[in-house]
Image: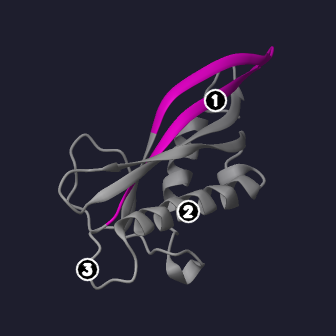
């Protein structure tokens, strides 16, 4: 059986993959993926989701209240001189799209459509140069709250 945490992670990556202009976003992602040990030669723009720290506290005698800190790494292509937007604007558009997608997922009952998931909280973002003169990106930070059975992390 798969843990509630793994179900949420997979659902998050699947949801991020729906960021397309046709779905009402500013950017069409080439891919959304879980973090890998080796960098991939993905077409840009793309995002990589990563679950970092998880904290647990007893909620009741038979459930844990859990919080997972996540990061979504956002990468864009270079912006050519003739384009109407700057690299800074392109990064902002992608960050806005990721934040919009997470807000849509938060509004679902339950968030990400995963039983046990309770909330998605955005904590902000940070921009950076990912190497090279023109390639920039950003990391969106957040927290996911969920519960699972004390004796079984696979059961909500």
Is 140 above or below relative to 100?
Answer: above
Q: Nearer the viewer, mark 2 or mark 3?
A: 3
Mark 3, secondary structure of its residue: loop
Question: Which one is earlier in the sequence, the residue at label 1 or at label 3?
Answer: 1
Report how far apart the C-alphas of labels 1 and 2 lie in the structure: 23 Å
Mark 1 highlights which residue?
67
Within 10 Å of disc 2 (Cα), the crowding (few <14, some 14-19, many 20+) is some
Within 10 Å of disc 3 (Cα), the crowding (few <14, some 14-19, many 20+) is few
Q: Foreground residue, 71 or 115?
A: 71
Residue at 54% x, 65% y is 97
- Can you give x and y, in whole percent of width and height, for residue 102 in the image? 62, 55
Within 10 Å of disc 1 (Cα), the crowding (few <14, some 14-19, many 20+) is many
Mark 3 highlights which residue?
81
Report how far apart the C-alphas of labels 1 and 3 lie in the structure: 43 Å
Residue at 23% x, 63% y is 134
Mark 2 highlights which residue?
96
Magenta region, residue range: 51-76
Report how far apart the C-alphas of labels 2 and 3 lie in the structure: 23 Å
> Which image quadrant for residue 81?
bottom left
């Amino acid at each position: 059986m798969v843990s509630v945490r793994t179900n949420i992670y997979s659902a998050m990556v699947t949801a991020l993959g729906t960021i397309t202009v046709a779905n009402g976003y500013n950017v069409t992602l080439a891919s959304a993926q879980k973090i890998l040990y080796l960098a991939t030669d993905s077409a840009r723009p793309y995002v990589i989701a990563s679950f970092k720290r998880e904290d647990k506290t007893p909620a009741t005698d038979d459930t844990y209240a859990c919080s997972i800190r996540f990061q979504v790494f956002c990468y864009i292509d270079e912006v050519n001189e003739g384009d109407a937007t700057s690299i800074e604007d392109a990064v902002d558009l992608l960050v806005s799209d990721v934040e919009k997608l997470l807000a849509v997922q938060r509004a679902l009952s339950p968030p990400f459509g995963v039983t046990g998931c309770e909330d998605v909280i955005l904590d902000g973002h940070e921009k950076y140069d990912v190497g090279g003169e023109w390639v920039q990106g950003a990391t969106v930070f957040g927290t996911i709250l969920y519960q699972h059975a004390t004796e079984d992390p696979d059961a909500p």
